[in-house]
Amino acid sequence: MSQRRTIVVVGASRGLGLALAKEYCARNWHVIATSRGRSEGLDKLRECYPSSLEIETVDIADGSSIRALARRLETVSLDALFVNAGICKANTLTPLEVDEKDFLDMMSTNALGPMRVVEALYYRVAEQGVIAIMSSELGSIVNCTGFWELYSSSKAALNMLMKAFSARHAGESRSLLLIAPGWVRTEMGGEQATLEIAESIPLVVDVVERSAGIPGLRFVNRHGEILPW
Ligand SMILES: NC(=O)c1ccc[n+]([C@@H]2O[C@H](COP(=O)([O-])OP(=O)(O)OC[C@H]3O[C@@H](n4cnc5c(N)ncnc54)[C@H](OP(=O)(O)O)[C@@H]3O)[C@@H](O)[C@H]2O)c1
């Protein structure tokens, strides 16, 4: 019997999600990491941590895929759930210019999908546990500068849906986090981003670990500082 804590990391094939899976393995958690297809990064990580890492599959833009994951995890007890998956399309375009499908894909993957995962797995998470979603500094309406406006609006929608979810679960003890990792060099973040993955993800995991047992919803950065909605 293992006393190790267990986490599900959704969207862990590459980038920040793969780094999250790596960081939790290094901290001796039991990690269930999901990808949509085969992930070379996760395969390699499993070679390093064969008794820590399990690989699962889910496409969060597909409700039936989320329900199937929830059924497969029906008997699993989690200390944390981290929904990291997200996409960015048409980041320089305006509402008039964007292809409708690109915008709807972002809304589906960045806002609706993560909340469906949270709804489907909420009761798998211990009462003193943590449910975190990767949001973004760009999801703050107060701090909006117009940068990547369509992507930003999908993260603002995510924040609103999580706020509504927390209102529906008022008085419950699980910690709910919307975390902004900073601007990080990944496929999505690009070359000009200001942070290396290693400057962000360990801090993000520290915030999640420190949040266990702290009920209610917070929108925070990688240092755990509160961000304006
Ligand atoms: N990098 C930054 O500067 C930054 C800043 C703020 C917030 N974020 C957020 O951080 C998260 C990770 O970003 P990243 O920079 O690591 O991006 P990334 O390198 O593009 O990785 C995105 C991850 O999300 C997965 N994903 C995309 N659509 C999915 C779906 N429908 N179902 C399941 N998984 C899906 C991808 O899987 P596949 O390999 O299958 O495509 C991949 O694992 C995102 O939510 C992003 O919005 C990033």
Image (spheres, rainbow, N blue to C red):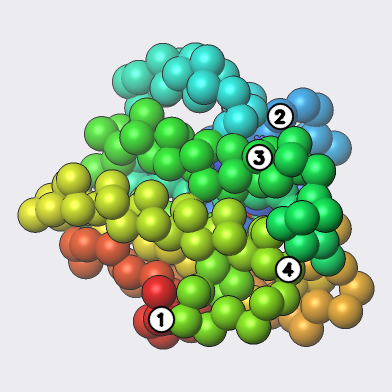
Query: Quick check: 56 above or below 125?
Result: above
Residue that carries the numbered disc 2 in the rendered image: 36
Q: Residue placed at 69% from the left, 39% from the top? A: 105
Given the image, on which type of amino acid does mark 3 rest? Leu
Cβ–Cβ below 8 Å for labels 2 and 4? no
Give the residue at mark 3: 104
Residue 88 drawn at (x, y percent): 75, 54
Ligand 1 neighbours mark 2 (CB distance < 8 Å): yes
Q: Which of the two discs, 2 and 1, labels the residue nearer the N terminus?
A: 2
Q: Look at 53% across and 83% down and name the residue there.
A: 143
| Disc 2 residue type (three-letter) | Arg
Dot 1: within a 10 Å radius of its alpha carbon, few (fewer than 14), some, or many (20 or more) residues? few
Q: From the image, tell me which residue sits under label 4.
A: 148
Marks 1 and 4 sit apart, C-alpha to C-alpha, by 18 Å
Q: CA distance from mark 2 to mark 4?
A: 25 Å
Among the two numbered marks 2 and 4 on one chain, the one whose residue lies closer to the N terminus: 2
Secondary element at image label 1: loop
